[in-house]
Image: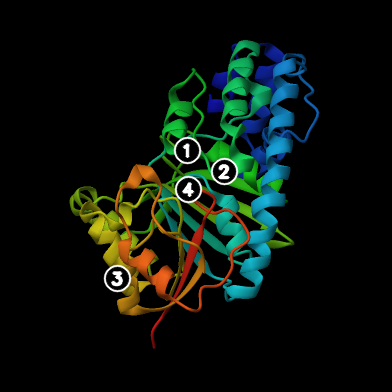
Amino acid sequence: MCIFSLRLARRSAALAAFAASLCSLAPSQVWAQSSTAAALLAGQTPASGAHLKTPAWSQYARAVRDNWQQYQTQIGAPMARWASRELPAFDGTVFYPFSGPDFATVSQLFPNAKRYVLVAMQTAQRPIDLSELRPQAAEQTLEVLTDAWKNYGRDGFFVTEYLDKYLHQNRVRIGASTFLSTFFELKGLRIKSVVPVDINAAGEVEELSASDAPWRSARFRLERAGQEVVVDYLRVDLSDKALSANPHHRQFVHRTAAHPVLLKAASHLPQNNSFSIVADSLSTQAPFIVQDETGIKYSQLRTHFAIRLYGKFERPHKSFGSYQRDLAKAFAESSDVRPLDFRVGYFKGGSYALIVAQRKS
């Protein structure tokens, strides 16, 4: 019996028969049968199940709708306009290390990419289908997801420690793929299939069987305006210790670093001596980098790249001490700092900065 039948047979004979019919379908067809799952996560489809016609569902749908509208107005739309003026129109692969499930930012800055590679420490898990949950589990999950969206419109990101909490807060394990699925729906991308993946011994992304894989990482195949887009979300520890212990991960990072790179809200980890391998790969391989102050050290960037500064930067967020003093000096002394009209990264008294780095020829 396949995983669908095992899960649903306990509920009723009718559900078991429906599950058996799903077992004969390809992964993309299975998703087609569950086409409302992403729309439910985005709060856009009226809930058909009685257990979702609740105040918790209404509150969640409103939280997603209101926060997404606030995000688009204050951050997303201004960011997209800025990117169209200031960034080249890349249409290949974009690499976003330390990303979490932040598809919103990378797709605003690189809207024409055919493949997005997001790397973070949070586990992907299977995307949640709210319609499949039992009433109590649905209620608890909606409460957790509502809390997750509470400050997104203002901040433009999910806090890392909260993402870890969402994974373990109740029996339904809410991983990065659930938030990614929500973003895809909100941005009008149709999910064709989603499968678990891993990085093989050759340092390449390899698709796994959906029925028995642990779903630490996931690959989404999407459709945008008739074109296929691939999003790989990979759970990889980017510390020197972990990359040294896993040569295939190191090979993957070094290879993927040869594409345009985004670094945002990265907790200044690329500036930490314990993350020198990934920082060196990015600084020596990437043709183009867009980052806030939490990315690669300014002194390391300017060795390899021609740099443009945007916004205002005087000091990091108070949680991160004295990082990027040379960047603060560059902002203070430069006569060519360009304006930035949207929030990006951590709150720093209302000032935000982006650095655009083009590799020197």
N-term-proximal mark, 4 vs 2: 2
Name the residue that disc number 2 marks.
155
Q: In this view of the protein, which residue sits in the foreground, 13 or 226?
A: 226
Label 4, residues with CA under 10 Å away: few <14, some 14-19, many ≥20: many
Label 3, residues with CA under 10 Å away: few <14, some 14-19, many ≥20: few
Question: Which residue occupies 34% across, 63% down?
Answer: 296
**Secondary structure state at the residue bearing disc 3:** helix
**Residue 56 placed where, x, y %?**
69, 18
**Residue 261 placed where, x, y %?**
45, 65
**Secondary structure state at the residue bearing disc 4:** loop
Q: In this view of the protein, which residue sits in the foreground, 125 or 317?
A: 317
Q: Is residue 185 above or below residue 110?
A: above
| Image marks 2 and 1: residues in contact by CB distance under 8 Å | yes
Can residue 5 be seen at all in this image of the molecule? yes
Name the residue that disc number 4 marks.
346
Q: Amino acid at mark 4?
A: Tyr
Name the residue that disc number 1 marks.
159
* Quarter of the image with the C terminus in it: bottom left
Alpha-carbon distance for marks 4 and 2? 8 Å
Name the residue that disc number 3 marks.
299
**Secondary structure state at the residue bearing disc 2:** helix
Quadrant in which residue 342 is drawn: bottom right
Q: Is residue 37 above or below residue 332?
A: above
The mark lying in front, picked from 3 and 1, is 3
N-term-proximal mark, 3 vs 1: 1
